[in-house]
Amino acid sequence: MKNCLFILLVLISFTITGCSKDGLSGEEPPEVNINIGNENYETKLGTYCWDDGCVDTAGPVELLKGKVPIKVNPGEKISFLMEYEPKPNEFHLMQVSESNENEVLIEENSFSAPTRKGVYYYSYGVWWKDDKEENLSHGDAFMHLF
């Protein structure tokens, strides 16, 4: 009987430590908003991996179909806002059209709107990478905006 109790306690211990999320909480990635001037806008959550599961969605052009684009002035500063700890330690921003993608430079969580008039779609990818294992991600998400 003592052996069964010991084995049960060991299994419970492995289960509890095996389900650790390495500091990432919640059922899905945190919300990301953008700030333009004095206004904040929501982004649309796309594909992500979080808490032992992944969700695959369409890209930004398809996900944002039927939504009203955010109007900005040419060259205006657009900032990403995420109220979540820990912050992701890797991020990329892609400007997406139906025919191509271009990486956009992000500095201090911000980028500048294009100077040419038009409708632009963006995919903001963030990763919570492991500090020790280079190719290990504890969570990732893509947020879309236009």
Image (cartoon, rainbow, N blue to C red):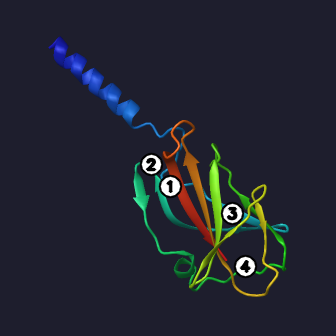
- The amino acid pointed to by label 1 is Glu
Lower position in the chain sequence, tag 2 or tag 1? 1
Quadrant of res 74: bottom right
- The amino acid pointed to by label 4 is Ile
Which mark, residue 33? 3
Q: Residue at x 78, y 78 (%)?
A: 114
Q: Position of residue 73 (x, y in %)?
A: 84, 79
- The amino acid pointed to by label 2 is Asp
Q: Is residue 60 above or below residue 52?
A: below
Which mark, residue 102? none
Q: Position of residue 93 (x, y in %)?
A: 66, 65
Structural crowding at the residue carrying mark 4, measured as other residues with C-alpha within 10 Å and reported as few (<14), some (14–19) or many (≥20)? few
Q: Which residue is mark 4?
A: 70
> Label 4, label 2: how many angstroms apart (C-alpha)?
31 Å
Structural crowding at the residue carrying mark 2, measured as other residues with C-alpha within 10 Å and reported as few (<14), some (14–19) or many (≥20)? some
Quadrant of res 69: bottom right
